[in-house]
Image: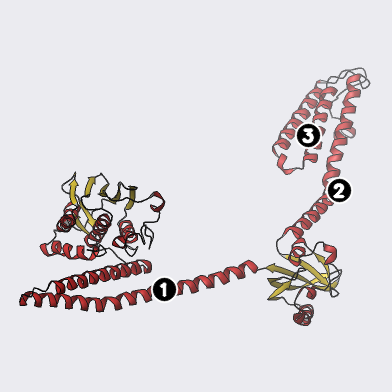
Amino acid sequence: MFSTFIWDIFPECCAEGVRPTAFAVISEYIISIVLIISLIVILRKKKYFSDRIFYFFVVSICFTIVSELLISFCIDMGDVFSVFAHYFKLVSFYFLYKAFIEFDLKAPHRNLQKSEKLYRILFDTIPTGVIIHFNEKIQIANNAFIHLAGEASKERVLKTPIWDYFDVEKRESFRKVIEQVKTQNTDIVFEEKLMRNDGNFLDVVVNITPYTYESDPAVLITIKDITSTKQVEFFKCQIEETTAYQKLQRDFFSNLSHELKTPVNLIFSTVQLLETHFKDALLENEKMKRYMRILRQNCYRMLRLINNLIDVTKMDSGYFKLNLKNYNIVNVIEDIVLSTAEYMDSKGISLLFDTDVEEKIMSVDVNMIERIILNLLSNAIKFTDRGGEITVKIEDGEDYITIIVKDTGIGIPKEYQKIIFDRFGQVDKMKSRNRQGSGLGLSLVQSLVEMHGGSITVRSEYKKGSEFIIKLPVKVLPEEEYPVILKDEEVDKYVEMMHIEFSDIYC
């Protein structure tokens, strides 16, 4: 303003009938470049504007740029370039005006409406029941409370006292609690049972808070359904009681097993003592010998059952531990199998042992391997008639060995193959007393195999025999440099264990 009207030094831009001067044209180009830069900045900052305001800004700047460029082409103030330039300028100012009106005047009102809408959506969608209680009536309630109360609509809830939804005996105390909150300006939280419209009750937590409604004291009440939490606590108590009962049951069986084992051991010791005396006296009483065999065999049966019960109880209680040492598993299994050869021969059953490896050092509990093999052989003998064949084979693998116990017995029907490893699962319960057992053997075998990190499966065809396949991982204990060598007395012990494991096979 000073350079034009006071100092008179501002460069001349245009005159009537003369094209714009070079200064004017260069100025229009500079102004256009500045506007283009502004447009680029706004495009990059688009996320800071609403869609409408962004649109107004961009259109306004574009019209202004076109207007500036048209002015640079005009010859005098009345030609077509000049007229369109001013029209475009007017349009650009209109959109600029719309942008500021939207941003400064209408936006806050819209934001307020939007906030109120979001508040109502939030109020009606939160899962906790919320009500405003004023003048002894419900003034405002959300959908969650309507659902908790079992009402069909809000109209049935509004203008109703909140204590109408609780037990009749609790209503007066509920009224006093609300008055206490209003007078003492404090929060009160408690558990109560909410009475639904259908007559059922829900366990709820009630939180009463001071509130101002239309400038008067009121209360804000939140009601949360905790019925599922109560049910979880109830079931948790039941589970704890069941677990305690199961522990008591395991302890009972454990004590019972030990109590049974003591007299059985005494009976068995007496049998052995009597046999020694009969032998020394050179008595030839066959009937007495027969009775002694029956007595001894049933002692073995009792010991087998008790041992299985004790081991199952230990496994259920988590007290069963393996005594792992490095052994040549091939020698261990071969000694166990050969210890039964004489017994097999007496039954008229051929026994075959085969292996494709002579030495395989791995960590096992040799006593449990003995239980596994003897149990499978016992089952094979039970279901194999005289003239049949039982084969025990060892196959070597890189990371595991496979032990196969195969017989030519009656086989297992397909419908029973899924239950033979279940505890007390038996295929032939009443058909032949000669083949009956406790139903614990194969379950125990599976548990012992899995404790070694292995697996056991069965392949069988009815009337064609069965094949039990055990896979054990090859693991070696690093602290043991050499494998343990079985002593002669340990090998002889297999014969004694054979009598116990084979005791279910009646003579």
Residue at 53% over, 70% down: 236
**Image point 60% across, 69% down: which residue?**
231
Looking at the image, residue 311 sits to the left or right of residue 343; the answer is right
Amino acid carrying mark 1 in the image: Lys
**Which one is in front in this view, the residue at disc 1 or the one at disc 3?**
1
Q: Nearer the viewer, mark 1 or mark 2?
A: 1
Task: Name the element at disc 1.
Answer: helix
Instruction: Verify CB contact (< 8 Å) between mark 2 and mark 3.
Output: no
Sequence-wise first label, 1 or 3: 3
Question: Is there any visible trace of residue 483 in the rendered image?
Answer: no
* Res 181 → quadrant: bottom right
Quarter-of-image position of residue 332: bottom left
Give the residue pinned by disc 3: 58
Q: Amino acid at mark 2?
A: Leu
* Residue 105 numbered tag: 2
Q: Nearer the viewer, residue 322 or 259?
A: 259
The relative height of residue 251 versus residue 469 in the rendered view (above or below) is: below
- Residue 27 placed where, x, y %? 79, 27
